[in-house]
Amino acid sequence: MARRKILEYPHPRLREQALPVTRFDTDLGGLIDDMLETLDATDSLALSAPQVDDGRAVLVIVPSGGASVPRTYTNPEILSRGAWGIVQESCLSLPGLVANVWRATEIRVRACDCNGAAFEIDLAGMDAVCLQHEMDHLVGKLFVDRLSVFSRLRFHAFAGRRARRRQQAA
Ligand code: ZN
C-alpha cells in the first residue's frame, strides 16, 4: 500500500472520462488499497480514482454514522433519485473551497465491490451527496461546474490568487 498524490485543479486528468473496470484483479486491489490509504491521510470522506491519476471508475467512501470501514464502488450508476436539497461541499482537488451545491439527497445506486460482486444500496444525506460528488469525478466534472455564475466567478478569483501565491512561493 502507498499513499498517492492527490491531483489538484486544473490538472487535465480531472477532466477525463473514467473507463469502466473490466478486470477485478490484483492491480485493481492495489489501486483500491492505495486509495484507502490516501483517503485515510485526509480529513475527507471520499475519493475517486481520477484524483489519484488513475482512469478507472472506482470510488471509496466512508459511510456516515460512526467509525465505519470505507465502502468501495466500482462502475457505480444511480438507479433513482428521491428528495433534493442544497448541500455544502468541498473537494480534495480544490483545496480551501467550500460551496453550496444542489444535489439529490436520496438515491439508489448499483455498483460492484472490489471483487466484482454487484450490489444495490439506498443512500441518503451525506452518503448520497458524497457518491454523486465522486461520480462527477468519473465523468471529468468538478463541483465548481455546478455552482451559480456568481459563485464560479468567485472561485476563479480564488483559484487565481492561489496560483499567484504558489508562484511567489516557488
Ligand atoms: Zn472532489
Image (tube, grey):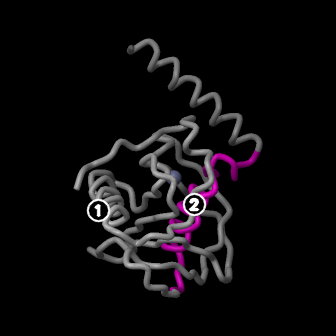
Task: In this rendered view, identify the residue nearer to me: 4 or 131.
Answer: 4
Distance from disc 2 to disc 1, alpha carbons, whole Å, reads 19 Å
Q: Quadrant of the C terminus?
A: top left
**Is 71 above or below relative to 36?**
below
**Residue bearing mark 1:** 33
Q: Total number of numbered labels?
A: 2
x%, y% of residue 42? 32, 51
Helix, strand, or loop for circle 2?
loop
Q: In the visual, does 102 lie left or right of 20?
A: right
Q: Amino acid at mark 1?
A: Asp
Image point (29%, 74%), residue name: 69
Task: In this rendered view, identify the residue nearer to me: 21 or 121.
Answer: 21
Q: In the visual, does 65 lie left or right of 156?
A: left
Instruction: Give the magenta part as a residue range.
Output: 121-148
Residue 99's disc is: none
Between disc 2 and disc 1, whose residue precedes?
A: 2
Task: Say whether mark 2 is within 8 Å of ligand 1.
Answer: no
Image point (71%, 34%), residue name: 153
Secondary structure predominantly adopted by residues drawn in magenta: helix
**Residue bearing mark 2:** 19
Image point (48%, 87%), residue name: 119
x%, y% of residue 132? 58, 66
Say if the magenta span includes residue 122: yes
x%, y% of residue 6? 40, 44
**Is 140 above or below relative to 95?**
below
Mark 2 Cα shell of 10 Å, populated few (<14), some (14-19), many (≥20): some
**Is 67 above or below relative to 28?**
below
Q: Amino acid at mark 2?
A: Leu
x%, y% of residue 18? 57, 57
